[in-house]
Amino acid sequence: MLSMKTVLVLSTSTDIVRTEVLAGVREFAQGTDWEINHVDFDGSPLPVKDLIRFWSPIGCIVEATGNGTTDKTIPKNSFGNIPVVYIGGDSHITPTNATCVVHDAVAAGETAGRELMALGLENFAFVGMSGRNWSRRRADAFASVLRMNGKPLSAMDVNPSGKDNERLQAWLGNLPKPCGLFAASDSLAATVLSVCRRNGITVPNDVAVIGVDDNTELCESTSPTLSSIRPDFRQGGRLAARLLARKLSGRGNVPQTTVFAISRIVRRGSTRRFMRKDAWVASALERIWKPDGVRLSPKDVVADFPCSRRNAEIRFRRATGHSILEELTNARVDVAKRLLSETSLPISSIAEQCGYISIAHFRDAFRNSTGANPLAWRKTKSG
């Protein structure tokens, strides 16, 4: 019988980050002699030395990317000689020369720039966290892509203590508008939305806002809901596990920093600039892009409009440039992409979850949208 060896995974973030990182680690561990034990940060410093004494792990993966993580949350010198891989490369948390897995800041900056420029905007802004390496990397990448395209940029860093709201309020009020704003994290973006709402700055018409991490619980609770760039945290978990295995084997050099990719953009109300032109279209879009919106039909959406179906379709197309059915299809394909890349569900189950009555209809819609059938698309995202 295979003797199992413990690998300890310490998580400090919430929602999608924690879930996907852990799933990626466990995917790598399949077929190995690893037993994955997982501990969540609950707000108080993690008793790392006690956890190591209890579990006797051969190695640790430390996901230190959120939830107010500081050097007091996970003390740098608590691991002794046990090999450690960090997910997140903030020098406030990680020791010198630590092995780190970080998401692609250049891709995040380019993605945010491309998304905001596609809205037809000419003015751009960035809100970051002062003294944080991850924020600086995202700021530099965003600034670079805007500079390359000849676009102006205003930038502001806020203090991690959260006491800069008055300064942020004045800065947001003075921005040239309309403006596209990239925030270095979803929590910063949520603060921007709150300050805008309290001071009569309309989102997305005055300021269109996009964050990073796609913390679903947070993004779905803001007003308007928050668009966000989702890094491929599952790939990050797999890479962290792979690097830990290399450290444990003692074979070959282990790079100090390894980058994982961006998964996709999750578009919500904070970047749908046309919405304010028609409140009924705005409401319809919010409903379509809710988690259960894939099960709607055009008839369901039209039923909420105070007019005939024909006029509802005209209003929707005037505001968005396409039909209600096309918007529903976009939402369904978006969900399908997530399920194909993040789960091993069979195509039949994915088709059903995306609101299709047959696999054939699902395949046709997916191919028309992406140029590939679902299985082929899944293979390009695996690994």
Image (cartoon, rainbow, N blue to C red):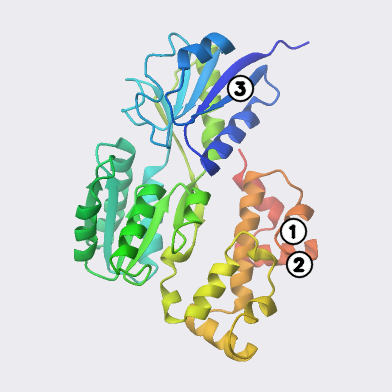
Q: Which residue is mark 1?
A: 351
Mark 3 nearby-residue class (10 Å; few <14, some 14–19, many ≥20): some
The residues bearing labels 3 and 2 have C-alpha atoms spaced at a distance of 42 Å
Q: Is residue 185 left or right of residue 82?
A: left
Callout 1 secondary element: helix
Q: Amino acid at mark 1?
A: Ala
Quadrant showing the N terminus: top right
Mark 1 nearby-residue class (10 Å; few <14, some 14–19, many ≥20): many
Q: Amino acid at mark 3?
A: Asn
Q: Is residue 266 left or right of residue 370?
A: left
For the residues labelled 3 and 2, say whether their Cβ atoms are less than 8 Å apart: no
Which of the two marks, 1 or 3, is nearer to us in this view? 3
Quadrant in which residue 307 is drawn: bottom right
Residue depicted at 28% across the width and 65% down the height: 199
Quadrant in which residue 81 is drawn: top left
Q: Earlier in the sequence, mark 1 or mark 2?
A: 1
Q: Which residue is mark 2?
A: 361
Which of the two marks, 3 or 2, is nearer to us in this view? 3
The residues bearing labels 1 and 3 have C-alpha atoms spaced at a distance of 34 Å
Which of the two marks, 1 or 2, is nearer to us in this view? 1
Report whether residue 323 is seen.
yes
On the image, the x and y values in percent for residue 292 come to 65, 61
Callout 3 secondary element: strand
Quick check: 155 above or below 318?
Answer: above
User: Between 115 and 364, which is closer to the camera in this rendering?
Assistant: 115
Q: Earlier in the sequence, mark 3 or mark 2?
A: 3
Mark 2 nearby-residue class (10 Å; few <14, some 14–19, many ≥20): few
Callout 2 secondary element: helix
On the image, the x and y values in percent for residue 101 come to 44, 31
